[in-house]
């Protein structure tokens, strides 16, 4: 006859058994011999193996090869009665993938058993990796902006000097060196073309690595698409032909950097969906046009295998990816969706009628009139009087090259904004004041604000030169004033046109 105590023990044992079976955590009992003795259903649900398959093999067989040494060391400690807290390792699923687990284990040395609970932390690990990647990309963006600035400064005087050399050599065509002049000019033109390629690469890098807050303006989407193609083309060219099927699109109000990020991501995704080896048999097609209600429509189509059935509804979810481990982060399309919807647009995905996938971006047409950027070359102005020009740039060679280009005018150069403050009242008035934005000690922004107090007319005649690096204060200034600005490296003709135009107003 059972006693009351034995009934309570039996009931407690039954409740413990139910808890073991129903727990969402992964509970197990393992022997010192390295085999599982008991597993709860969470293991089979997560790993895909049956309990019999898991218990019939040494558990170390399921551990990732890179984690086995640490796992065996932890097991050795458990055989000596030491508890285990915080071990993290990967276990292989039946489909060949791996899941991360964090362990808490104790041992019963006399029985030769280990009692353990393991929590699946795969999602947490992936999120940590994405945050690390996002932080790294932000750092790369900041670094790229600084690198662009450092490249653009010397590139400014390289291009200006090449342009000046062509001007200087051309009149020699009728002299004793005429037999060589054509070859010299060709060499200079090839050098100029190479410098122009560098300028475009730096501009694209600077545009698509911007880390500052969103800055919208009225833009045409086609130039953004072209820049995106240049950035992503290396991914495409080894897998497919790139086909441009451009139709007319309305202007949209968007941040060109963010929108470029969307197009680059879609182009890279399209390329990576196509296996290498048959470039001529595959294509990535970019289609632009206007939809039935007048909005801008952009499609990226590929001839890959298409989107797997049942995946389309999840394609824009954060951390969801169909790419192999190491190729996809699961964030790209989610970020694209966030960017496009923040601009009032939509992005959708579907399979093409024959093969491949189609990603469609629709952006609302703007009612604002597109304005010509102050960075665009102005119309050729009629040459006017000899002007007085001040050039301020901490890179002396930039000022020297501009001085040579403007030798028909009275040009003063300085590498210090503080020195310029002293020159302006004593050697002015200047018709035009070219000033670099980013300089040590005193920036172009600080110079403008000081001149606005002392000599507002001189502040109005400032033209800002930028190599691409901006501070928040710089953006605030440029947003609230109408002064002209030019990007380095600049065209000699453009500099001359600005001087002629502003001198005519003085």
Image (tube, helix red, strand yellow):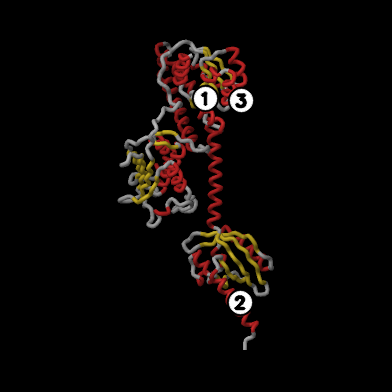
| Rendered residue at 52%/24% (across/down) | 464
Q: Earlier in the sequence, mark 3 or mark 1?
A: 3
Q: CA distance from mark 1 to mark 2?
A: 80 Å
Can you say whether 283 is above or below 197 in the image?
below
Q: Is residue 383 above or below residue 194?
A: above
Q: Position of residue 370 (x, y in %)?
A: 40, 30
Please state the horizontal and vertical placement of residue 434, each as a whole percent of the image: 53, 20
Crowding at mark 3 (Cα within 10 Å: few <14, some 14-19, many 20+): some
Check disc 3 and report its element: helix, strand or loop: loop
Name the residue that disc number 2 marks: 12
In x, y percent, where is residue 285? Answer: 35, 43
In the picture of the structure, the residue carrying the numbered disc 1 is: 465
Mark in the foreground, 3 or 2: 2
Q: Which quadrant would residue 423 be assigned to in this image? A: top right
Q: Residue at x 53, y 34 (%)?
A: 145
Callout 1: 10 Å neighbours few (<14), some, many (20+)? many
Q: Which mark is residue 196?
A: none
């Amino acid at each position: 006859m059972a006693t009351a105590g034995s009934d309570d023990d039996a009931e407690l044992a039954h409740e413990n058994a139910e808890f073991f079976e129903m727990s969402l955590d992964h509970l197990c009992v393992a022997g010192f011999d390295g085999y599982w003795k008991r597993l709860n259903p969470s293991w089979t649900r997560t790993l895909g193996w049956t309990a019999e398959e898991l218990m019939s093999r040494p558990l170390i067989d399921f551990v990732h090869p890179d984690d086995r040494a640490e796992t065996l060391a932890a097991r050795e400690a458990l055989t000596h009665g030491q508890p285990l807290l915080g071990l993290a390792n990967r276990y292989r699923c039946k489909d060949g993938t791996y899941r991360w687990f964090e362990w808490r284990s104790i041992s019963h040395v006399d029985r030769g058993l280990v009692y353990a609970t393991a929590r699946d932390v795969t999602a947490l690990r992936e999120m940590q990796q994405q945050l690390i990647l996002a932080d790294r990309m932000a750092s790369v963006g900041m670094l790229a902006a600084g690198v662009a600035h450092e490249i653009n400064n010397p590139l400014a005087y390289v291009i200006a000097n090449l342009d000046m050399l062509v001007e200087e050599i051309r009149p020699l065509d009728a002299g004793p060196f005429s037999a060589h002049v054509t070859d010299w000019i060709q060499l200079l033109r090839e050098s100029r073309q190479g410098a122009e390629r560098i300028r475009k690469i730096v501009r694209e890098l600077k545009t698509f690595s911007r880390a500052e807050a969103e800055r919208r303006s009225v833009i045409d989407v086609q130039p953004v698409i072209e820049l995106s193609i240049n950035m992503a083309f290396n991914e495409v060219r080894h897998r497919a032909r790139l086909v441009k099927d451009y139709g007319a699109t309305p202007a949209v109000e968007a941040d060109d950097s963010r929108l470029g990020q969307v197009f680059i991501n879609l182009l890279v995704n399209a390329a990576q969906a196509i296996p290498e080896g048959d470039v001529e048999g595959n294509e990535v097609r970019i289609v632009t046009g206007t939809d039935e209600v007048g909005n801008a429509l952009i499609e990226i189509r590929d001839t890959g295998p298409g989107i797997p059935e049942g995946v389309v509804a999840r394609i824009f979810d954060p951390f969801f990816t169909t790419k192999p481990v190491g190729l996809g982060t699961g964030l790209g399309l989610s970020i694209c969706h966030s960017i496009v919807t923040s601009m009032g647009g939509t992005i959708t995905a579907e399979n093409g009628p024959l093969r491949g996938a189609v990603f469609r971006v629709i952006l609302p047409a703007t009612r604002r009139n597109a304005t010509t950027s102050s960075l665009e070359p102005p119309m050729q102005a009629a040459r006017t009087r000899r002007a007085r020009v001040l050039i301020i740039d901490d890179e002396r060679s930039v000022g020297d090259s501009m001085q040579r280009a403007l030798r028909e005018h009275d040009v003063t150069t300085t590498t210090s904004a503080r020195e310029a403050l002293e020159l302006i009242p004593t050697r002015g008035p200047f018709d035009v004041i070219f000033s670099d934005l980013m300089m040590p000690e005193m920036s172009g922004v600080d110079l403008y604000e000081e001149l606005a107090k002392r000599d507002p007319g001189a502040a109005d005649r400032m033209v800002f030169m930028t190599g691409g690096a901006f501070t928040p204060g710089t953006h605030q200034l440029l947003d609230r004033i109408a002064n002209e600005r030019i990007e380095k490296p600049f065209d000699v003709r453009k500099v001359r046109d600005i001087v002629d135009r502003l001198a005519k107003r003085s």
